[in-house]
Amino acid sequence: MSYWNPVEVMPLPELKALQLKQLKMLVYKLYTFSPFYRQKMKDAGVTPEDVQELEDVRKLPLMNKKDLRDGYPDKLFLASPREVVRYHASSGTTGKPTIVGYTQNDIEAWSESVARGLVSAGVGTDDVLQVCYTYGLFSGGLGLHYGAEKVGAAVVPASTGNTERQIDLVRDLNVTVITATPSYLLHIGEVAEKMGLDLKKDTKLRLGILGAEPWSERMRDRIYERLGIKAIDIYGTSELSGPLWCECSEQNGIHVWADITLVEILDPITGEPVPPGEKGELVVTMLLKEALPIVRYRTGDITTVHEEVCACGRTHPRIGRIQGRVDDMIIVRGINVFPSQVEHSLMQHPEVGNEFQIVVDRKGALDTILVKVELRPEAFGDRLFELDAIKDRLTHKLRDALNVGVNVEIVEPGSLPRFEGKAKRVVDKRVY
Ligand code: DLL
């Protein structure tokens, strides 16, 4: 088993001591130098002396995306413009972007996090790694790029788009690792098939580093089955830096580097911590970030935390697969519906293709959900008469899973929109 940095297997007591030291230094620095954090801490009646144990992090005030948006473009920055070496931005849902600045040390800590994750997933100097996340203000492309270069893989900075050319590159450059959103990877698979190429046989692809959008275990199975690729889950958000942590080759949770980051899982309503293994909102403190400090940031993502040492020997905590968001859940007739639940249900049916769309509408006072589903082309064949039966099965399955009435429409394979970046699964037509 190889590690990128010995800190990954540091005994827990030492790791926690290191984390506490970083936390205390951070709080002291912010209280002294950051008007934003000093004010927030004063409002909460907390001083740096109040942080003596790791658990004391809970005394610090929470922050969220609105704080960052209100600080547009750089009101929350602690570094001077001279120290900033990079900007990225996330557009969010309201249109106004959040700007994230990086010092050289920020870039270093970010690439270090990604490098550790890639090595833990089995990426090394012999690999050719194609980055199919967008390069630009979105942090996905450059985040993977810097991490992969650090570990010495040969990077193909393909970005998104021109899918046929992406496939040519995979074949001609003997690409072994591909990084993309899971939905784009499946689209690449479909296009390859149309080009008469079998990614399993005709390329050297063996590993996918997939994230930036919700996906499921079923999708993981499907990717393996159809493309012959081991699929690794990678998580991050622009505010925290970008893609940051991924699963190791054990595929049993996403390793969070505790010397760089402190994570909490809180009940999203009460703000109280939930026990390890139970679902709650992921709240993150970045211990080393300089340009845009992040303390107790509410990601809005629902997951679990696991503190046992991983079978790979790494001692740092792991988070489970992201199970939805606190805020992009659709509320239909008072019931919370997550697109990930829909995906999970649909993907259990072998005849269902890779694409679906959830259309929410309002008829009179009643909200309605229509799930448009593509079947695999094979499901049509000469068994057309079975379509009604399939539709009924999917409808019942979704109703059971979501606890709300759902209609299903079977649509032609290839007719739903494809996405090169994050898939947009929900169309909400309700007028409020
Ligand atoms: O998506 C950063 C990233 C790039 C992550 C490349 C992984 C790979 P944002 O655009 O700010 O940043 O979106 C962050 O995407 O809060 C989650 O809701 C969602 N997300 C990211 N990774 C995963 C994942 C990038 N593995 C938001 N599973 C987050 C589920 C994910 N959701």
Image (tube, rainbow, N blue to C red):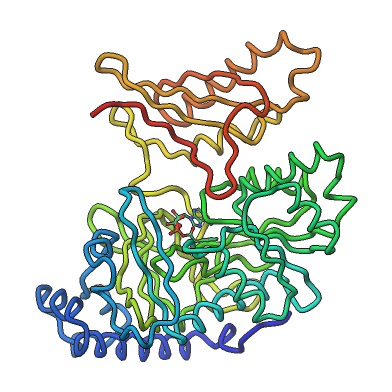
In this rendering, would 369 be left or right of 178? left
Where 421 falls versus 42 (above or below)?
A: above
Quadrant housing the C terminus: top left
Residue sitting nearer the eye, 412 or 167: 167
Quadrant housing the N terminus: bottom right
Tell me where residue 155 sits by quadrant: bottom right
Q: Position of residue 82 (x, y in %)?
A: 36, 87
Tell me where residue 387 sits by quadrant: top right
Q: Position of residue 83 (x, y in %)?
A: 38, 87
Where 202 falls versus 345 (above or below)?
A: below
Tell me where residue 80 sits by quadrant: bottom left
Q: Where is residue 76 in the image (x, y as percent from the top left)?
A: 25, 74
Q: Which residue shows up at 22% across the image and 75% down it?
A: 60
Q: Which residue shows up at 58% across the image and 83% down it?
A: 8
In this rendering, would 351 be left or right of 20? right
In this rendering, would 122 be left or right of 253? right
**Which residue occupies the extreme right position in the image?**
201
Where 242 falls versus 48 (above or below)?
A: above
Q: Where is residue 23 in the image (x, y as percent from the top left)?
A: 33, 85
Q: Which residue shows up at 10% across the image and 78% down it?
A: 42
